[in-house]
Amino acid sequence: MFEARLAQAQVLKKLLEAVKELIQEANFEVQAEGMSLQAMDGSHVSLVSLHLRSDGFEHFRCDRPFSMGMNLNNMDKMMKCAGKEDTLTMRAEDDGDTVAFLFEAGNQARVSEFELKLMDITSENLGIPDNEYAATVRMPSGEFQRIVKDLATIGDTVEIVVSKEGIKFSANGDIGSANVLCRHSTGGKEEEQMVIDMVEPVSLTFSLRYLTSFTKATPLAPSVTIMLSRELPVVVEYKVADLGWVRYYLAPKIEEDEDMDA
Amino acid sequence: MFEARLAQAQVLKKLLEAVKELIQEANFEVQAEGMSLQAMDGSHVSLVSLHLRSDGFEHFRCDRPFSMGMNLNNMDKMMKCAGKEDTLTMRAEDDGDTVAFLFEAGNQARVSEFELKLMDITSENLGIPDNEYAATVRMPSGEFQRIVKDLATIGDTVEIVVSKEGIKFSANGDIGSANVLCRHSTGGKEEEQMVIDMVEPVSLTFSLRYLTSFTKATPLAPSVTIMLSRELPVVVEYKVADLGWVRYYLAPKIEEDEDMDA
Amino acid sequence: MFEARLAQAQVLKKLLEAVKELIQEANFEVQAEGMSLQAMDGSHVSLVSLHLRSDGFEHFRCDRPFSMGMNLNNMDKMMKCAGKEDTLTMRAEDDGDTVAFLFEAGNQARVSEFELKLMDITSENLGIPDNEYAATVRMPSGEFQRIVKDLATIGDTVEIVVSKEGIKFSANGDIGSANVLCRHSTGGKEEEQMVIDMVEPVSLTFSLRYLTSFTKATPLAPSVTIMLSRELPVVVEYKVADLGWVRYYLAPKIEEDEDMDA
């Protein structure tokens, strides 16, 4: 049997909104350590990985490892029914074909139970190696979302350059060009800081369409961490307070790609 | 001559928004006792009835009973022009073919007058018998709206069961199922209470599409009262403070209906 | 070289939103006195004129008069990237084919530079004679916007009548008619005043479609000034605090026009 209780149903709702644009169906893997999901987007270009630690839940019981295949749009319909202050309890039998979501208001006057049909999804668990990165940038998640959105109005790809000057985002298009430079700045609150940790300068180009999808995770965390290295996929990580993280991976564009896009 | 003055034009605007999804054209009947409207929706499945007492108006004069046929969408276009704080005066000559809506701001710096063309609408006034109901439930109108909206994402019909446990709303669909249980709870403010008055348990099934239309009346009142009996149409009533009410009637689905829908 | 700096990038953004519905491409003329634009809308019915004085800028340098042809939709895409508190610096070389917009946040942690391609636009500078007007009305810009919007739900044209009674806006349509009367009222804050300065009564009819476009300037100024004379285009003026103004001109409809529209 699997049973897990979150003090805030909204956290799972936001996690779902952060991934459902990229992934339509996925297996949630549950085991004693927690709950995780890993999947490539429909066009096999980007990878989403999320992990929620069992100790971040109010209550977590998983008798044996278990895979729950869900249609994320259907799951989202149910998660949208969670009230702002509701707690969430997930529950599934070991051999059942449904998972139940229980939303409870603080005063217990209302109890809503949704049962979602599970589905069989074949998935390959991709090993993601632990890499060292040439540059790691932590910045306000809203700022990153803003920059990606702005540049997407100018062009299709963004060149990200990390140098001593800071991190620079550039795009070109028919109507002109755009450059946004963010400088290292560690004053103020932690979530307003722009912390650039550079081993060596790096310059990479990415599709703005995928980065735009990644920024759907913005409501989950005040900061985002971007890890860059030549010839490695960029990692865009949002930490979920006291619970875990969601990470997105996207391979850089190489010049041939750009020509093909043109 | 008919002339009636409401301190808040917004009340009539909200009433109109509460009924215009179901009814496109209707006769407003005015007489010394007040103003009323009764009509079936376009597909003759549900019935809307509203009544505004003359003593709830700042001023009400009706020389003789009078029927004003209006296109509710056109009336709504004019009501949308009422300012938030405007008063409303309605005025019609006994044999005229228009009704005038006067909106006045508190400071009288602006006076807007809209004249709507009346139309001939044949209508049958349906006698609605006063019934005793097996169960009467008063609950926060926003909560009822929420439940109806949530269940409509899961299925087409809702089973409403009133028992000692409380009132339970259930829906089934392709993606799974949903159950929302609200327990009797009389603490707190009156408008937050869930008051279940049950003579005998009752279990009935209704179309969620029509209930969804009924909940357009939510802005009119903090509470909604739901009256249920076996083989009788459900009554969903919203009281308009100091003025009157709007009531919706919908026959329960019987099993044959459900099969036909499937 | 041309370089000009505005403390609030949002002002230029709002100006653009105020004109881009009417004008798709236009020349911004820069010279020592300031920056101006004048253009007829696509159907050559209305005229837009805007002027920003050089002394309203934090910094303004223009070595020689210069015309910058811009696609306003593309310019708007870039202006939308300005943060709420950003300053704006515009910069162009005398013989360059681009103009740069620099947005800087107060803390200078982020600098965004957008380069827009300039284009050659043939434009005729129309002399606008200084006229005396029979009636000049200053009213809250939000009130004017509201009236125009309300009347546009009833009819296609508005008759504006200025008399001793006040200023009256009237429209007719299939569903009925509307009259809005605003009386001279000079109490309260300056921006809430309705100041009617009438030399002689005037009654003119205008297309509501164009007036609706003019009210896109509402966010620029709390008041709007409307200048009316028989057989002259109406002038609708919004002042931009400490910087300049935007003015719209629209010829009145004559009876033949109305017949043709009917």
Image (cartoon, coloured by chain):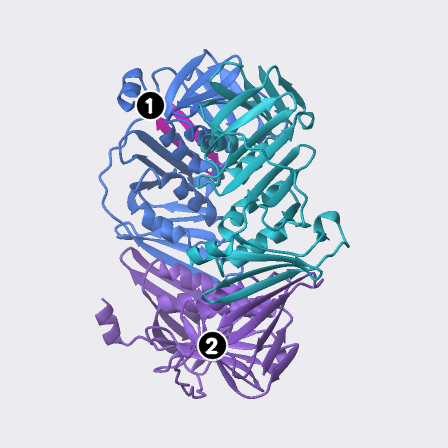
Chain colours: A purple, B cyan, C blue
Residue nearer the viewer, C98 or A216: A216
Amino acid residing under circle 1:
Ala
Q: Residue at x 58, y 66 (%)?
A: A10
User: Which residues make up the magenta segment?
Assistant: C234-251
Q: Is residue B43 above or below residue A168?
A: above
What is the secondary structure assignment of the residue under circle 2?
A: strand
Which amino acid type is marked by label 2?
Arg
Q: Is residue C240 magenta?
A: yes
Q: Is residue B215 left or right of residue C202?
A: right
Magenta portion: prevailing SS class: strand
Q: Which residue is mark 2?
A: A247
For image coordinates 49% across by 33% down, the residue present is B76
Secondary structure at badge 1 equals loop
Q: Position of residue C88 (x, y in %)?
A: 44, 51
Q: Residue C93: x percent and y percent?
A: 30, 52
Instruction: Residue A168: give its label.
Output: none
User: Per the image, is C184 magenta?
Assistant: no
Which residue sits at x=45%, y=34%? B73
The residue that disc 1 covers is: C251
Would residue B111 appear left or right of A167 to someone viewing this image?
right
Instruction: Identify the residue at horizontal 37%, vertical 15% (top origin).
Output: C230
Q: CA distance from mark 2 to mark 1?
A: 60 Å
Question: Which is more toward the observer, A83 or C57?
Answer: A83
